[in-house]
Image (cartoon, helix red, strand yellow):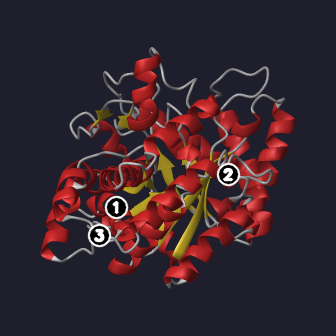
Amino acid sequence: MTSDFLTSLRTRHDKGGTDALVSVCSAHPMVIEAALLHGAARQQLVLIEATCNQVNQEGGYTGMTPADFRDYVFAIADRVGFDRAQIILGGDHLGPNPWKSLPADEAMQKASDMIAAFAAAGFVKLHLDASMGCKGEPAHLSDSVVAERAVTLARRAESVAAGQAVYVIGTEIPTPGGATEALDHVVPTTPDAVRDTYQVHEQAFRAALPDAWSRVIGIVVQPGVEFGHEDVAVYAPQAARALVATLGDLPGLVFEAHSTDYQPGEALAQLRRDGFRILKVGPELSFALREALYGLDAIRCFLDPEAVPLIAVMEQVMLQSPGNWQSHYPGDAHTQRILRHFSYSDRIRYYWPASEAEKAVTALMQSLDGVALPETMISQYLPRLFERVKSGALAADPKTLLLQSVRDVLDRYETL
């Protein structure tokens, strides 16, 4: 069972194992397909997570409920021949965040309904995050209040999941999706903060849900990694030494790290060695997909000078609906234009499901279907894939190149 695999993460770490779960946090169908193909090639479980804003009982920004998202992922798995039993579904930041403008009682009722929907849909890994204040409350709540609300959410999940769910506690600041300002430095979570979070949650769970406490497998902390619009804070093991040492005080738990996108392979390997056995990645996967789409489109536009560039279509789509980027990208019009397409935070990912974007991508793929892509153009516009195409290790067809671009990101997480 996948829950058994999750509850054994700490045991395998203590025995010197180097495996980690890469948490794929994306709703893009090609990213999910690439993740499943990556898992199949390595004969690994695949963890796919949805956030509370992305998917919830009201539809979230994807328009999908947890059951809808499950069926969506399973349909992709069936199409590519990946065993559904090898998929771990997770819910991330499950708490009142989507409804924090409401009074706490109302927001927590909606959060409880949400986690019940996740549990009923077969999501096994549930991240309890009630750290944010609701209407009339401070932005960040005390550990005791957060733990009390986490137990409330777990109790609702337990009523549905019948002891099959596993839990992750804790949160990170800033909230998910990347920092919104330049990164001068990112401070790892302090040992006292980790111990306090652990102890207050342990006390609350043991008093109310002792069996569920045995299935709390991880704690989200900030190891000192983050990405902004134009820069990346790379893991510095020395700076995180005191944090890493606290793992010995957290029996049964591993660390979960968010925003590990764009970390070098050696940094990811060191995170695993230091006990960060759940590594979340999302925007980098869709960033890599966008890079490959734009590369293929550059080839298409050279071969067919009358083609409408994909980047022009996406620019128009984003300008017509600025809600998902305007408040996030600072600067003048020129700077914002660059960020719309090339920011590490990759907020263009919200726009690929738009009808005009889907039509443009479909037109791109159809125009290149059966076309012999010149190796020299692949060298120019998709250079990371060129050597494999030239050697014959990688087929030079558009979909293969797109999927491999995403899989290359996931491959980096396997660096020892």
Measure how far apart labels 3 and 2 are at the Cα level: 40 Å
- The structure residue drawn at horizontal position 28% and vertical position 52%, both measured from the top left corner, is 268
Q: Amino acid at mark 2?
A: Thr
Q: Is residue 416 visible?
A: no
Quarter-of-image position of residue 66: bottom right
Q: Residue furthest front?
A: 306
**Is 39 situated above or below 18?**
below
Secondary-structure class at tag 2: loop
- The structure residue drawn at horizontal position 62% and vertical position 76%, both measured from the top left corner, is 75
Q: Position of residue 102 (x, y in %)?
A: 82, 30
Q: Position of residue 354 (x, y in %)?
A: 63, 48
In the image: residue 360, left or right of residue 114: left
Quarter-of-image position of residue 234: top left
Q: Is residue 291 visible?
A: yes
In the image: residue 262, left or right of residue 110: left
* Label 3 sits on residue: 15
Which mark is nearer the camera, 3 or 2?
A: 2
Mark 3 / mark 2, whichever is N-terminal? 3
Task: Please state which of residues 15 and 229 is positioned toward the viewer in this rendering.
Answer: 229
Q: Amino acid at mark 3?
A: Lys
Q: Amino acid at mark 1?
A: Leu
Secondary-structure class at tag 1: helix
Q: Which image quadrant: the C terminus? A: bottom left
* Label 1 sits on residue: 410
Q: Which image quadrant: the N terminus? A: bottom right
Measure how far apart labels 2 and 1 are at the Cα level: 23 Å
Number of callouts in the render? Answer: 3
* Label 2 sits on residue: 62
The residue carrying pointer 3 sits among few (fewer than 14), some (14 to 19) or many (20 or more) residues within 10 Å by Cα, namely few
Mark 3 / mark 1, whichever is N-terminal? 3
